[in-house]
Image: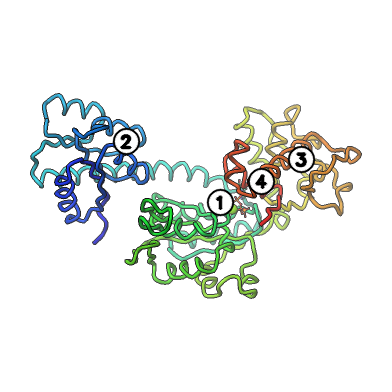
Amino acid sequence: MARKGSVLVVDDEEIMRDVLETLLSAEGYRVDLAKTGEEGLECYGKRAYDVVLLDVSMPGMGGLRALEEILKADPEAVCIIITAYATFDTAIGAWERGAFNCIRKPFQNEQILETVASGIKRRRKEEERQNLRRAMSRSVERGSIIGRSEKMQDIFQLVDQVAPARSTVLITGESGTGKELIARAIHMQSPRASKTFVTVNSSNIPSELLESELFGHTRGAFTGAVAAKKGLFEVADGGSIFLDEIGDIPPETQARLLRVLQEREFTPLGDTAPRKVDVRIIAATNIDLKEAVRQGSFREDLYYRLAVVPIELPPLRDRREDVLALAQHFIRKYNEENGRHVSDQLAPDVLALLEQYTWPGNVRELENVIERAVVIAPGSEVTRQCLPAEIADPSKAAGAAPLSTGTGSLDVSRGVNFYDEVRRFEIDIIRRALDQTGGHQSRAARLLGMNATTLNSKIKTYNIQLRS
Ligand SMILES: Nc1ncnc2c1ncn2[C@@H]1O[C@H](COP(=O)(O)OP(=O)(O)OP(=O)(O)O)[C@@H](O)[C@H]1O
Ligand SMILES: [Mg+2]
């Protein structure tokens, strides 16, 4: 039976919990029970139920307090109050506090079922509204994928062709070439656009946790699994899942993933019954997966299942025609973000320098270079002085590594400018934070007061080597 929705029943009386559980499970709802307001709140914190049935009089935190707390955590929560004292006052009180409805005990089963059904309907409508809002804000972004080169035009055409289908896409390309951007574009141009796009970065998740993240687990499936958890495949149902850094997936997880691709179903850890899902899989990697297959670290059968439609993003140095348009796009973007008014018309010498450079960090590196140039530009133009030394002075940087990530002393004789100092400082503190946290990125991010995604992108931009 298709899952109709999830209901949390919060009642201190065992008999009431039993009655409601039997009644609602028979209708096909997934039902969880809580004995107190506190417990109910804790359950809701772990999983956003579609509907909550709340008894008013319970020892400790009563139903009306629990109602307030749940709504504080999730203003869209649909809570139905059940009370034996359905005086006019309690009912009004519940409504004023934001309850969806109020039912008096003793109740007719029908009454419960009807109210829960309309609560679920309201919940679905709200989800749809939110998805649409998200989809709209992303489609605005979609308009900003830049690429005039023939190579990128071919890729856009391929994206248009594959987007409507459910076929699995494998996006390859060096770091910073725009793989995630293209993955989002595929989702946004698909009939799934109004549904969720879930991103999983396999290299950010410890391998022991990856499977439970992807497939979910039942309560007690392993030590520490105190509550059941929905897997990301289930979250993405109807939408798309973006498996980033797919090359980092350990062998056991590769085997389970293969099964999802073949059978379109998966089994949460600790569970026995497989679940069907309708998910579009988009994978990405910056390593050579074919080589990984040859070396035996990546399953060949999985490779072919993933690479149904391969999209290879060319490095920026192979499409220098795109540099100008990208630079202009980023100037406008960072002007807006920083309240600056730097001209998006580049002086010929600056443009020439940008076009000559090899961009080992690709578009991400260009974006970073422009962001800083916009911030430090003394006047209304990006000048040579706003560029990092290895770009501004290619003759001196020739033969040298694009950027030394070492923390050695600054070589003033090479004309280190402000930009480099900022960069070295940043690299230095990031390395220290990583050292201190044993390479744990999210902890390091917390230490730096930076969000984890920002830290991850800086690590990539600066090509900071992570010790494993
Ligand atoms: N064609 C493009 N037009 C506009 N912005 C782009 C383009 N390509 C990449 N970018 C921007 O460059 C940055 C890096 O892109 P993205 O994160 O998609 O790269 P990636 O290939 O996934 O990199 P990695 O392998 O390091 O994860 C992002 O901020 C993205 O918005
Ligand atoms: Mg990426």
Q: Which residue is mark 4?
A: 434
Q: In 3D space, how far apart are the residues under numbered discs 4 and 2 (Cα atoms)?
A: 37 Å
Q: In 3D space, how far apart are the residues under numbered discs 1 and 2 (Cα atoms)?
A: 36 Å
Image point (38%, 44%), residue name: 132
Tell us which disc is closer to us: 3 or 2.
2
Q: In 3D space, how far apart are the residues under numbered discs 1 and 4 (Cα atoms)?
A: 27 Å
**Label whose residue precedes the other's in the sequence (4 or 2):** 2
The disc at residue 424 is 3
Task: Say which of 329 and 292 sits in front.
Answer: 292
Secondary structure at badge 2 equals helix
Residue 137, given in percent of the width and then of the height, sits at 46, 41
Compared to residue 124, the image places residue 151 above or below, namely below
Tell us which disc is closer to us: 4 or 3.
4
Task: Say which of 103 and 376 sits in front.
Answer: 103
- The three-letter code of the residue at mark 4 reads Leu
The disc at residue 315 is none
Secondary structure at badge 1 equals helix
**Label whose residue precedes the other's in the sequence (1 or 4):** 1
Tell us which disc is closer to us: 4 or 2.
4
**Label whose residue precedes the other's in the sequence (1 or 2):** 2
- The three-letter code of the residue at mark 1 reads Leu
- Looking at this view, name the residue that lies furthest to the right: 413
Image point (60%, 61%), residue name: 285
Tell us which disc is closer to us: 1 or 2.
2
Task: Say which of 214 and 165 sits in front.
Answer: 214
